[in-house]
């Protein structure tokens, strides 16, 4: 999904990133992954905040030609989902109340840029 | 492919929200608050005119060994390719396994999040159509 530059912002020290997007077109597909699972149009607004921790990490695979270098991070999310056709709306609790099990933040090179 | 869901308390079905993130176009959209663009033909390979060369479309290139399985990413975890774009260099963050609570429009309190509730951003340079492009993308 493309994001305009205003949708991704960083703190001055680069340790916090905020991704904020509205009206993302999605589908509601309750019976996924059934082959005949029907889907309906839905929309998502979300705000996602990454905060880098102090633990450095590096993931690299020369065979698959990728290298990620950065830090472990916390991530928190708040979102609103709308499914207009069934008049369904869901809003998460505030950002601060969410948590994620895995998060990383850094830089990556892969493919033709791997050797650089 | 990505998915997210909200499990509805009191109901025995799960509401999967499969996000339309399989298309990417260059991100240079104006506006203070973004409005995400849906799948577009803007980056599809153009049909050359007047015997011009064909260098493919400007869509970011998917991760080859993931795309062959019909996916464009894999679950976020240590020591895996975290990008959804191949031939990419830039800033990237990825997270998964969200837990949280929320409320629907009928006042029901619902849990949300699964191990595959997975988000990322990729901001930087990618290579397609035989030239570099700048873009910001999100995976949801």
Image (cartoon, helix red, strand yellow):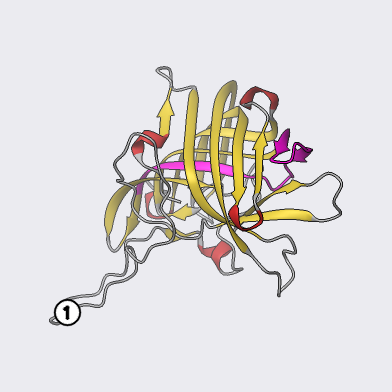
In the image, residue A24 lies at what x, y percent? 50, 49
In the image, residue A78 lies at what x, y percent? 61, 33
Residue at the left extreme?
A: B50
User: Residue at label 1?
Assistant: B49
Q: Is residue B114 magenta?
A: yes
Mark 1 surroundings: few (<14), some (14-19) or many (≥20) residues within 10 A: few
**Is any atom of residue B34 visible in this view?**
yes
Instruction: Tell me which secondary structure the magenta stretch mostly adopts.
Output: strand
Query: Over which residues does the magenta segment extend?
Result: B101-125
Q: Nearer the viewer, residue A94 or B137?
A: A94
Residue depicted at 45% across the width and 60% down the height: B23
**Is any atom of residue B99 visible in this view?**
no
Task: Check the image and report above or below for A106 versus A28.
Answer: above
Residue at the bottom extreme?
A: B51
Lateral position of residue B45 relative to residue A50, left or right: left
In the image, residue A82 lies at what x, y percent? 60, 48
Tell me which corner region of the image, top left, top right, bottom left or bottom right, holds residue A76. top right
Residue depicted at 50% across the width and 43% down the height: A67
Q: Is residue B107 magenta?
A: yes
Tell me which corner region of the image, top left, top right, bottom left or bottom right, holds residue A33. bottom right
Report in which chain the residue with disc 1 lies.
Answer: B
Q: Nearer the viewer, residue A58 or B140?
A: B140
Task: Check the image and report above or below for A48 versus B30.
Answer: above
């Amino acid at each position: 999904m493309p994001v305009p530059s205003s949708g991704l912002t960083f703190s001055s020290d680069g340790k916090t990133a905020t991704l904020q997007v509205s009206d993302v077109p999605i589908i509601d597909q309750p019976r996924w992954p059934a082959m005949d699972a029907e889907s309906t149009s839905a929309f998502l607004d979300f705000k996602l905040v990454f905060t880098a921790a102090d633990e450095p990490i590096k993931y690299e695979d020369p065979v698959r030609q990728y290298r990620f270098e950065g830090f472990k991070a916390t991530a928190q999310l708040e979102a609103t989902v709308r499914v207009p056709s069934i008049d369904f709306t869901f809003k998460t609790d505030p950002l601060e109340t969410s948590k994620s099990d895995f998060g990383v933040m850094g830089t990556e090179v892969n493919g033709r840029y791997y050797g650089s | 492919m990505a998915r997210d869901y909200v499990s509805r308390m009191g109901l025995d079905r799960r509401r999967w929200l499969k996000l339309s993130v399989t298309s990417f176009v260059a991100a240079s959209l104006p506006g203070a608050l973004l409005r995400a663009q849906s799948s577009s033909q803007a980056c599809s390979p153009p049909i050359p005119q007047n015997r011009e060369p064909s260098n493919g479309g400007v869509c970011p290139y998917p991760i080859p060994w993931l795309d062959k399985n019909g996916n464009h990413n894999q679950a976020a975890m240590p020591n895996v390719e975290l990008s959804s774009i191949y031939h990419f260099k830039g800033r990237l963050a990825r997270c998964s396994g969200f837990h949280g609570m929320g409320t629907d429009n009928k006042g029901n309190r619902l849990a949300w999040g699964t191990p595959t509730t997975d988000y990322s951003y990729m901001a930087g340079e990618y290579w397609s159509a035989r030239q570099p492009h700048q873009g910001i993308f999100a995976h949801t």
